[in-house]
Each structure stands twice: as structure tokens, then as C-alpha cells.
Amino acid sequence: MTAPRISVIVLAWKLVDELRACLAALEAQVDAPDFEVVVVENGALPAVRRALDAVDHVVRVDLPENAGFGGGCDAGAAAASGSALVFLNDDALPRPTWLAALAARADRPDSPVAVGSLLVDQDDVVQESGSRLRSDAGTVQLGSGTAHSDAGRDGLLASRPVDYCSAAALWVDAAAFDAVGGFDELFTPAYYEDVDLQLRLRLAGGLVVVEPAAVVRHESGTSTDDVPDYRAFLGQRNGRRFAARWSATLATAPPADAPLAQLCTVTAPAPVVLDDGGLDAPHPAVAAEYVASLLERATRAEEAEETLAHRFADLQHTHHESQQATHALKLRFDELQLRVDELESATLADQVRARVSARLGRR
């Protein structure tokens, strides 16, 4: 049996309906080269496994524990037969011509080693048409928030080289992927591993492009939306690691609003010294670090609460003193008001007589 040209790798963890919809969208692909679907059960919940039991013609890779995004993708790549790997999120819905468009772009004479998709939301608003690196290790999703009907005006619907593309829907040449060692466990369990991979592909001489004709509707962050603190923690943690490794490359990053053709210049990465003893057991290590960060936040919150309590006590004391001063002023005001009332009740004649009597008394 001839091996398929393409292996589409989908990680499955806890999303059931989204996974079913994703797999159905893959079955609906038209004009695509031969492809297989590799589903990695990445510590998947029982409901996800039951859903997969009802699906035919997929290669299943069973990981009893969640290996993170990069680890799960590496496991899928190891089981893949295709000469091209296409990583696809389970919350992504590719349009029917998506895979054909990726393959056509990969076959063009410039032979890119990675081809990204145009990501849009359910209203066809652009999420990303390739991405740009910033000097602070932040990222810019090009075209984010632009209506698809207006994207052409800004050059977002033309295929072009980019710093990197999201691995939510990313074509990678399998030989190039293997040559650079796949995704790096440095970024386990998630965030920045796809950026790091594509910089290593570019450093090896490969071309990374976006192909806006390959359209995918994507529900960004679905897997971690219910744990925003954890998501923010991972982004910050891995952002620091990424910045340490690629500092020289980041120094060449153009401004966020630079023309689309301006890219960072990829230079050799620096070694990253971990402060947690490595990642032999990725999730326990990350969990421990995450808990430590939460404890630190809780401590800061307690200190802030204590500061606010002292400040509130000071305000109460000031308020009490103000009340006493106001009471004293009111008493003085009442005395003055009585005097004014007395003066106003006296007739002019009375005032004259009083003044005359006073003068006579002094004689």
C-alpha cells in the first residue's frame, strides 16, 4: 500500500464536539493529495476516547498522560507516514479546499518548508495571516481584527514569507521537521513551541510562508479558556525562555507596524539555563512552578489587602478628626449666627442711643 503524501496530526484532549466537527471537516476536503489523519489521544478524557471509537480510518496514538502540545505533536509525527506533516488543532474547522491550497503552495518553486493558514473567526474576521515577532518576545498576529473583505487591501491575502505562523493549522516538511529535532520540550506543555520550531527551520535555511487561500475557522484558546491564570502563567514562563534563547534574533525585529515584507533576521540561539532542574516529568514540573507562582500572587494579594486595611484605618481616623473639626466649626457658626440675629433685631435708633450712652458714660 502506497504511503499518503500528507499526515494531518490532530491532538485530542478534552474537546468532544469540536473534535467531531474537525474530523468531519477533514473528510470533506476536496482536491487534496492523498492524506491520512493521525489523532493523538493526548491524555484524552474518556468521552473523547469514546467519540474516537466511532470514527473510522484514523491512525490513533494513545498517550496515557498529556504530553503537552509539542510532545503530543512529536508523538503524532513519529507515527506519521507522510512526507509532509500538517498540525491541526481539534478546535479548528478547515474549509473544503484548505489542504489542497497548502499542498499547492508547498509545491511552488521556492519550496517552503513550512506553510501557515489564514485563521478566521466564525464571522470571517481575520485572526492571523502570519505572525511577526517583536523585540520584547511579544508577537503580532498580522491582520488580527480585519474583516476578510478588507484583508486584500492590506496585502493580507497574498502568500508571502513571515516570521512564523500559528501551529493551529501548519504544514511542515517532514524531513525538515526531523532535521531540526521537532518541537522542543523546553516549552512543554504549551506556548512558543511553534515559534521556536519555525525559527530553527529558518536558521537551517528553510522558508516559512503563509498561504491565505488555505482558510481555517479557529476558536482560539478553547482548551485553556477555563483556566486563564494558568494560560497567562504559561505564556509568561515560556516567553521568558524564548526571549533568552532567541535574544539576538529578537534584537533585529522590525517595528510592529513595519511593512509586511520586513522580517527578523534569524541568528544562532543561545543556550537556556533552566531554573527548575529540567523537564523530565513535564507536567508535574510545570504544575509545581505554577503553584509556586499562584502562591506568590496570593502572598502579594495578602500584602495588598493588609496595606488597604491600614489605609482604611487611616482614612477612618482622618474622617473622625474631620467630624470633630466640623462639629467645632458648627458651634462657632451658631454663636456668630446668634450675634447676627441680635444685631439685626435692634433698630437703628436703639443702636444710636446705645452709642450716645456709651460716649456720655466715658465723659
Image: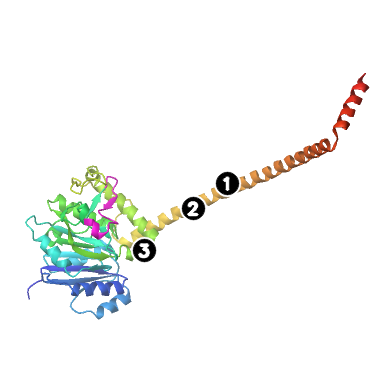
**Which quadrant holds residue 130?**
bottom left
Of residue 323 and residue 357, the one placed in the foreground of this image is 357
- For the stretch drawn in magenta, the main secondary structure is loop
The vertical placement of 241 against 65, above or below, is: above
Magenta segment: 134-151
Under mark 3, the amino acid is Asp
Under mark 2, the amino acid is Ala
In the displayed image of the protein, which residue is found farthest to the front? 349
**Which quadrant holds residue 7?**
bottom left
Q: Marks 3 and 1, Cα distance to the nearest angstrom?
A: 36 Å
Q: Is residue 113 left or right of residue 279?
A: left
Q: Position of residue 71 (x, y in %)?
A: 24, 63
Give yes or no for residue 49 being in the magenta stretch.
Answer: no
Which residue is tagged 1?
311
Which residue is tagged 2?
301
Counting residues from the start of the chain, the first of labels 3 and 2 encountered is 3
Which residue is tagged 3?
225
Q: Marks 2 and 1, Cα distance to the nearest angstrom?
A: 15 Å
Under mark 1, the amino acid is Arg
Q: Which residue sits at x=21%, y=59%?
A: 183
In the displayed image of the protein, which residue is found farthest to the bottom? 54
Residue 347 disc label: none
Quarter of the C terminus within the rendering: top right
* Secondary element at tag 3: loop
Mark 2 in CB contact with mark 1 (< 8 angstroms) = no
Number of residues whose C-alpha sits closer than 10 Å to that of mark 1, classed few (under 14), some (14–19) or many (20 or more) = few
Counting residues from the start of the chain, the first of labels 3 and 1 encountered is 3
* Secondary element at tag 2: helix
Q: Is residue 129 visible?
A: no
Q: Position of residue 307 (x, y in %)?
A: 54, 48
Of residue 167 and residue 24, the one placed in the foreground of this image is 24
Of residue 73 and residue 262, the one placed in the foreground of this image is 262
